[in-house]
């Protein structure tokens, strides 16, 4: 049997089978990778900036397709209503957590638009609340460019806001801002300024993204390649078994002839 398995003809079959298996397994993994990537968020079109008033309304929810859009806002900052958003990193999409050396404050300043409404603007990030850059609010009429973000949840506000100093909030919640900025019409969401104001650190924010759609066809392709790999092993086994049987039969034939 060993002589049959190591014969030149069988060695060629072994090498061919190994090559086919490697190729089919890699092709299957390639198709599986395409399937997995299809479910990840995909970069969406990033159109040019538009006036913030066209996307961020008063008293209505923000639709998902406008999140991350580039916007511009013209008006006057109201420094007297400025707030610090506590326990924040310089990255909108950074993971949560209570302990981090990178945590500090977002500087949230309302911009009064020409129609009298207030648009919350995250002007930038600071590590300490007493940073001089916090008080350096631009005066007069300004034009702010940035990306639009939806308001944040208030669960953490209800749990932790009681322990915050005056002038600080836990999240950028439109409902809470309406209560703090009494008598003002506040547009939903907030704008992350790009570039930041003065010497503040830039708060990073991702461009628009769309939810990925799983391409089940690629998963089927991956399964097909692995089925082909299994079939190649099945055929190899049958070829080897037939070769071993043939050699055994040939070996037995002379012995049977001598006995006869």
Image (cartoon, helix red, strand yellow):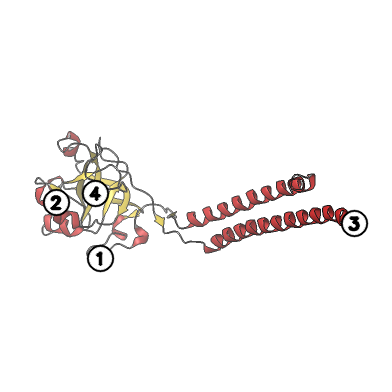
The answer to whether residue 134 is visible is yes
- Residue under label 1: 60
Q: Earlier in the sequence, mark 3 or mark 2?
A: 2
- The C terminus: image quadrant: bottom right
- Asked if residue 249 lies left or right of residue 62, the reply is right
1 or 2: tag closer to the N-terminus: 1
- Residue beneath label 4, please? 121
Residue at point 39%, 54% (across, down): 208
Mark 4–mark 1 Cα distance, whole angstroms, equals: 18 Å
Mark 4 and mark 3: Cα distance apart in space: 100 Å
Residue tagged 2: 160
Of badges 1 and 2, the one in the foreground is: 2
Q: Secondary structure at mark 2?
A: helix
Q: Answer whether residue 116 is visible to the viewer in this image.
A: no
The answer to the question of whether label 4 and label 1 lie on touching residues, with beta carbons closer than 8 A, is no
- Looking at marks 4 and 2 on the same chain, the residue that comes earlier in the sequence is marked by 4
Cβ atoms under marks 3 and 2 closer than 8 Å: no
Q: Which residue is mark 3?
A: 257
């Amino acid at each position: 049997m060993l002589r049959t398995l190591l014969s030149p003809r069988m060695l060629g079959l072994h090498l061919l089978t190994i090559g086919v298996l490697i190729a089919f397994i890699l092709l299957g993994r390639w198709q599986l990778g395409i399937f997995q990537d299809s479910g990840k968020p995909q970069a969406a079109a990033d159109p040019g900036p538009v006036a913030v008033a066209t996307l961020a309304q008063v008293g209505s929810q923000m639709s998902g397709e406008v999140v991350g859009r580039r916007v511009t806002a013209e008006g006057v900052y109201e420094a007297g209503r400025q707030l610090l958003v506590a326990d924040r990193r310089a990255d909108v999409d950074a993971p949560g957590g209570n302990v981090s050396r990178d945590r500090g404050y977002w500087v949230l300043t309302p911009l009064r638009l020409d129609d009298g409404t207030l648009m919350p603007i995250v002007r930038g990030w600071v590590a300490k609340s007493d940073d001089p850059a916090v008080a350096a609010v631009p005066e007069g009429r300004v034009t702010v460019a940035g990306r639009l973000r939806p308001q944040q949840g208030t669960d953490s506000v209800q749990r932790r806001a009681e322990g915050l100093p005056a002038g600080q909030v836990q999240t950028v919640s439109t409902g809470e801002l309406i209560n703090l900025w009494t008598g003002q019409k506040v547009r939903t969401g907030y704008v992350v300024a790009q570039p930041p104001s003065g010497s503040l650190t830039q708060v990073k924010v991702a461009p628009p993204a769309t939810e990925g759609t799983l391409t089940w066809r690629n998963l089927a392709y991956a399964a097909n390649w692995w089925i082909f790999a299994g079939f190649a092993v099945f055929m190899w086994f049958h070829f080897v078994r037939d070769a071993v049987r043939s050699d055994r039969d040939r070996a037995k034939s002379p012995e049977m002839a001598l006995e006869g």
